[in-house]
Image (spheres, rainbow, N blue to C red):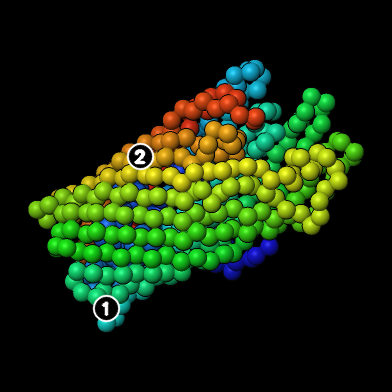
Amino acid sequence: MNKLPAAVGLILLTATGSALASGYRIPEQSVNSTARAGSYVAYTPGADAAYYNPANMSWLEDRAYLEADATWIHLNSVAYADSRSSSLNGSSEAENFFMPTFFAVSPDYNNFRVGFSVTAPAGLSKRWQDPYPRTFAEEFSLKVFEFNPTLSYKFSDRLAVGAGVRAIYVDGKVKSNGIIDHYGSTAIRDMDGDALEAGYNLAVTARPTEDMNISVTYRSEVDLGIEGHADLNTNVLSGRYSGDTGVEIPLPAILAVAVSYTFFDQLTVELEYDQTYWSDYAYLDFTYPAPFANPVFAAAFDDAKAKHWSDTNAWRLSVTYDLKNDFILMAGFAIDENPVPEATLGFELPDSDALLYSAGVRYKVNKDMELGVAYLYDDKESRSVNNGTVKGTIDEAGAHLLTFGLTYAF
């Protein structure tokens, strides 16, 4: 298992993942993005442009920028009502997390600028204590952290491009505990693992006029080859395994297209469309050094589980209003599809389509410093499911985000 340097590890220990957008993606990484419901690609006036659209670093004032953000995330308890028997009902644990992020942009060097960001672009955390859901997902967590150096180049006052390298660290944990058949056969697992992988991102922004930005960004898929340790137990044939395990899951590619326009030098409206390529997630297949002879281990823990997720679309709209008195107001709305088909939905991620509502404010303390705060509510739809595992209604899912940020320019 990979080990990070102590300084970086300290940052990671303060955060964990949570499914906020489609699948296990987390678009909201800064005050601006939280306040604008992720509609933050074409008009990115802060240091967080280093992550969201590195081409836009070219349009920042010729200074160095630093930004630190901290997000509190609350995940609602998810209610499951089984259509077969109330004895199978359950509620997931409510979750509370703290997620820090960091962004930096250099001054201009002959039309080049350098950026860097530390973010948590994806994650998942779901825990169930009720007997039936716990059989499949007592705990299912995935923490993903990205270290993203970027570079921009301005061809002219009308065109800039950007690119970066994605260094991804992932840490995962899976636990389940329950009876899996009518004969009382038990299946218990406790797995953990991590990985360090790499990808890339690209960006371009065109400015037909001083008031309009047209941007396209792309973040590559990164296959997360997680390796670690598994402890498995069953009462069938006195089965026990303690040893190596591995699994590969995708951090999907994302394509975003956005247009922003500033009216009378105060009101900026941005419309963004993004597609997340979840169709790369076809199977969840844990691997071991050798096949299991124990039939419970083979069926419960070794056989590949079909996922067959679908690509998803999101539409995001935001407004930014500069009051010209040191306050800047922001608001956003988004429609976000979920990638999980009914046939393969499970308790580890009982996802559904969502509507997102957000608002925030930035305050200019002085010419060098700015403070910000933003709130977002992720409202998940109720969902009825009928498959081999889940036969009932998933309800009351949702999330609240509260982000605080500090920007300093020099």
| Residue 252 percent coordinates (x, y) | 49, 54
Report if residue 388 is visible in the image.
yes
The residue to which callout 1 is attached is 111
Name the residue rendered at 43%, 35% in the picture: 353
In the displayed orientation, state which residue is furthest to the right.
237
Q: Locate residue 114: give its quadrant.
A: bottom left
Name the residue rendered at 77%, 28% in the picture: 181
| Residue 211 percent coordinates (x, y) | 15, 59
| Residue 230 percent coordinates (x, y) | 75, 51
| Residue 165 percent coordinates (x, y) | 46, 69
Mark 1, Cα crowd under 10 Å, few <14 / some 14-19 / many 20+, is few
Residue nearer the viewer, 237 or 115: 237
In the displayed orientation, state which residue is furthest to the left.
264
Q: Locate residue 218: give its quadrant.
A: bottom left
Residue nearer the viewer, 247 or 6: 247
In the displayed structure image, the side of residue 21 where residue 81 appears, left or right: right
Amino acid type of the residue that numbered disc 2 sits on in the rendered structure: Ile
